[in-house]
Image (cartoon, rainbow, N blue to C red):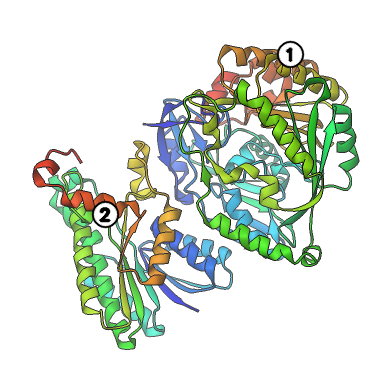
Amino acid sequence: MQKIVIIGATSTIAEHCARLWVQAAPVCLILVGRDEARTGRLADDLRVRSPQSHIQVMSSDFVTASAIQQTVSTIVAEAAVDVVLIAHGVLPDQTTCQEDVLACDLALQVNGVSPVLFAEAFAKPMLETNHGTIAIIGSVAGDRGRKTNYVYGSAKGLVSRYAQGMQHRLVQTNVKVVLIKPGPTDTPMTSELKAKGQKLASVEQVAQDIVKGIAAGTPVVYTPGIWQFIMLVVMHLPRAIFNKLNI
Amino acid sequence: MKSVSAWGRLSHDLHEVQMLNDRTYVAPVLSEHQPGLAYGNGRSYGDVCLNPNGNLWHTIGLNKLINFDEASGRLTCEAGVLLRDIQRLFVPRGWMLPVTPGTQLITVGGAIANDVHGKNHHAVGSFGDHVLGISLARTSGEVLQLNWTSTPALLSATVGGMGLTGLIVTAELQLRSVSSPWLRTETLPYQGLSEFFELADASEDNWEHTVSWIDCLACKTARGIFMRANHMTAQEAAVMPSLKSTLTVHQQKIQRKPLCVPFVPPVSLVNGLTLKPFNMAYYQMQKMKRGFDVAHHEHFSCPLDNLQHWNRMYGPRGFYQYQSVVMRENGQTAVQAMLDAIAASGEGSFLAVLKTFGNRQPKGILSFPQPGVTLALDFPNRGERTLKLFEQLDVIVREAKGRLYTAKDARMPRDLFYAGYPRLPEFLQHRDAGISSAMSRRLMEF
């Protein structure tokens, strides 16, 4: 059985990836979340979907480096991990972050520092066995900073650069790093956007792209695929034009 | 605020939307944002799922399964789970929902609140007949556990209760065992309503699913296509080796993106020019399929689920569905009178369904199914002309002691509602004072 670890398992995107994995074949899943009861409800759902799968729940602190290291050590001590999906994140309110550095700090920690620490902590044991895939959920928001969400965007930008560097470092090994960049997706994290009527990608489609990308070891997965072209344009817009945009 | 429409696309009013995604945190959202209304997957046609300029509690995020007992087939799940997801997960494991309506793309909560029925109503009843219990959040902040033994009154008000008694958070459902996804079908063209009723009666005992398509413009001759089907066992399916590859094709097909009506055409594609030729072509095509065949349960039960946004084909003004049930004694006369009125008006569409209901009482106080015959037709919205026709049809339904289906309705007058649903006063005692819909304001006090 494939052993898959999901960090931030209660994230809706992660939850749908988990559904796809258990649906394809019985797997050994370790769900790591902050809230044990919520993660437990997710585990129950997956057990109904796949009674043959082995599903385990773990709770962890997501911002303290020592806690992150300890969580990862506990997981890898049992058996080698085939796939880890690092999926947690919060969409902070940009204005709040501008006015309150504490909120800004937390947003940067949770969306940027925490995922890369998890990735780094998993890389070491995976390199020892020379096997495994580390998938991290970044965001299209990390491709170019813009006024309406650059705190979140810069944290995701950190994730992007970090993943890029790890890919460079691990290129000669069997450990793969997959960076996923979803566009705005229909999840509770974006419910404010949805309530305003913004068009969002379906989480099922995004999860499908992610699971496919992980299986293939694709270095960068834009999902839905159209975002690769949108961001290509956004990234190359001359500053003079970009600065006039209200985005 | 967000623009929300029902399936009929008759209105596009703004709503204050609250997304629910944690079953342990529903009642607080309700008490904080009331009055409001639960909204599932938006597949009811009229205004039963709308609350213009008010709160709308979206349940589609409540999509977790909770427990399944492989021995008894009892499934507990959250109310936002789609029927399609239950079917696709459990049919390969030998269980399925006993009742699915013409679309699987509805939530469990919506199926209960509208007490939906399927083509096998005469055999197994409606959705509510297979609900063992539910948990119901009220705007007072409490969450009630309902079942048929300890709280029969509130549960029977909630089944078919249009979401007005509270928000269904979780449900325990009795699945039925099946050993294959296949149905053995038989297609029989018929001429005239007498022939339809003969076929329906003859099929009642030995066929689980019966339904018919009827050409709403054919007038006196009332030509149609009668379809009946039974579930096949694994042994029966095994003797047809071609089914294996058909199933593979079906599974590949559902993995791909379904076909889609990509935009709303400027005028309804269903109109006077297209309707007659389409009905004629459809009838002739189906007639050629006369005889026995095998169909996947999804194709047989929910043929339109493969075409996303099919409701767009009725153009920017949307469409109505008029679904009535009338008693069996005067059923033939009433149905004939309705078909005559429709044919004379030139309104109508090719989505016209005629089916007999079984002789059983539903569990819900306001459930739609009753013994008799039900006729359902789509009508592109052409304003006054369409509404005038409905008034004529209302007279026929009222005289035949029938009623209209609230899940489809967007315009019935109060007196027809009162006449069709005599147990309304009993229902009103169970309403949640913090819940109100466009339909409830139209048909009741609030």
- Identify which residue, B353 or A32, lies in the foreground: B353
| Residue that extends furthest to the left in the rendered view of this protein | A240
Q: Quadrant of residue A215?
A: bottom left
Q: Is residue B327 left or right of residue A238?
A: right
Q: Residue at x 34, y 50 (%)?
A: A189
Secondary structure found at label 1: helix
Q: Is residue B438 above or below residue B284?
A: above
Q: Residue at x 42, y 49 (%)?
A: A202
Mark nearer the viewer, 2 or 1:
2
Which residue is identified by label 2? A140
Percent across and percent down for residue B204 are 87, 42
Q: Is residue A112 above or below residue B292?
A: below
Q: Residues within 10 Å of mark 2 (few under 14, many from 20)?
A: many
Q: Residues within 10 Å of mark 1 (few under 14, many from 20)?
A: some
Percent across and percent down for residue A21 are 48, 67
- Identify which residue, B394 or B186, lies in the foreground: B186
- Which quarter of the image is occupied by the N terminus of chain B? top left
Which numbered tag is attached to residue B395?
Answer: 1
Q: Residue at x 27, y 49 (%)?
A: A230
Q: Is residue A189 left or right of residue B226?
A: left
Q: Is residue B76 visible?
A: no
Q: Residue at x 45, y 35 (%)?
A: B263
The answer to whether marks 2 and 1 sit on the same chain is: no
Q: Is residue A224 left or right of residue A139?
A: right
Percent across and percent down for residue A35 are 38, 61
- Identify which residue, B268 or B274, lies in the foreground: B274
Q: CA distance from mark 2 to mark 1?
A: 59 Å
- Which quarter of the image is occupied by the C terminus of chain B? top right
Q: How many marks?
A: 2
